[in-house]
Image (cartoon, rainbow, N blue to C red):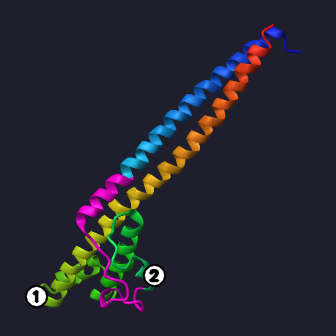
């Protein structure tokens, strides 16, 4: 059987631990929200400066038959991670597949080393290098960081919600301690 003095010590200890957890969750939530704002605003700012636009929907550059999944982006600027991924994979990726029958820069570069006077291979190598570089930047610096920002956002919502729940429990614990003074 727990003595009254031991029970009060236990109540105070758990209430103080709850308060510490509340503060930790609140701080984590604030840091997560800062990370979200930093990541998404930085990605948006950098992408907007690049002035990358999808061709108008249905135009020869974005035909509905070749790019059915990109029609919803027609004419829009690439200004977030979702659009960066769509442009990188759906637009640039499909164009790169046509350059050398689906071969990558690495494959064409190896062929070009074996035949350094082949102008077609040299041109394909340059095109694939530029396209794969831009695609990689859009996926890494655009889509990946945007996704990290979204993960930070959802984690911060969970932490802030947990902090609010813990605060309620701390208040209830404090009321319990005051109610059972003796």
**Residue highlighted by disc 1:** 117
Q: Quadrant of the C terminus?
A: top right
Where is residue 120? Give x, y as percent: 17, 90
> Which span of residues is magenta-colored?
40-67
Residue 158 higher or lower than 79, as above or below: above
Residue 143 higher or lower than 31, as above or below: below
* Left or right: residue 165 compared with residue 141: right
Residue 30 visible, this angle: yes
Of circles 2 and 1, the one toward us is 2
Could you say which quadrant of the image residue 174 lies in?
Answer: top right
Camera-nearest residue between 125 and 137? 137
Could you say which quadrant of the image residue 80 lies in?
Answer: bottom left
Residue ID at (33%, 58%): 44
Could you say which quadrant of the image residue 116 lies in?
Answer: bottom left
* Left or right: residue 27 compared with residue 130: right
Q: Quadrant of the N terminus?
A: top right
* Left or right: residue 88 compared with residue 182: left
Which numbered tag is attached to residue 36? none
Camera-nearest residue between 92 and 53? 53
Query: What is the secondary structure assignment of the residue under circle 2?
Result: helix
Where is residue 20? Give x, y as percent: 58, 25
Classed neighbour count for the residue bearing mark 1: other residues with Cα under 10 Å, few (<14), some (14–19), many (≥20): few
Query: What is the secondary structure assignment of the residue under circle 1?
Result: loop
| Cβ atoms at labels 2 and 1 below 8 Å apart | no
**Residue highlighted by disc 2:** 69
Where is residue 64? Give x, y as percent: 41, 89
Residue ID at (34%, 73%): 76
Q: Is residue 66 shown in magenta?
A: yes
Classed neighbour count for the residue bearing mark 2: other residues with Cα under 10 Å, few (<14), some (14–19), many (≥20): few
Q: CA distance from mark 2 to mark 1?
A: 39 Å
Where is residue 6? Give x, y as percent: 78, 11
């Amino acid at each position: 059987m727990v003595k009254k003095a031991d029970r009060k010590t236990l109540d105070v200890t758990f209430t103080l631990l709850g308060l510490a957890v509340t503060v930790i969750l609140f701080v984590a939530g604030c840091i997560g929200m800062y990370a979200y704002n930093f990541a998404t605003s930085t990605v948006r700012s950098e992408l907007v400066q690049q002035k990358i636009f999808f061709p108008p929907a249905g135009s020869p550059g974005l035909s509905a038959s070749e790019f059915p999944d990109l029609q919803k982006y027609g004419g829009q600027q690439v200004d977030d991670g979702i659009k960066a991924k769509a442009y990188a994979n759906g637009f640039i990726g499909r164009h790169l597949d046509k350059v050398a029958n689906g071969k990558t820069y690495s494959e064409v570069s190896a062929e070009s080393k074996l035949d350094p006077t082949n102008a077609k291979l040299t041109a394909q190598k340059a095109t694939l290098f530029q396209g794969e570089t831009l695609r990689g930047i859009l996926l890494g610096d655009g889509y990946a960081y945007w996704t990290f920002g979204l993960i930070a956002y959802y984690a911060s919502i969970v932490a802030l919600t947990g902090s609010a729940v813990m605060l309620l429990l701390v208040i209830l614990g404090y009321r319990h301690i005051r109610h059972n003074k003796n």
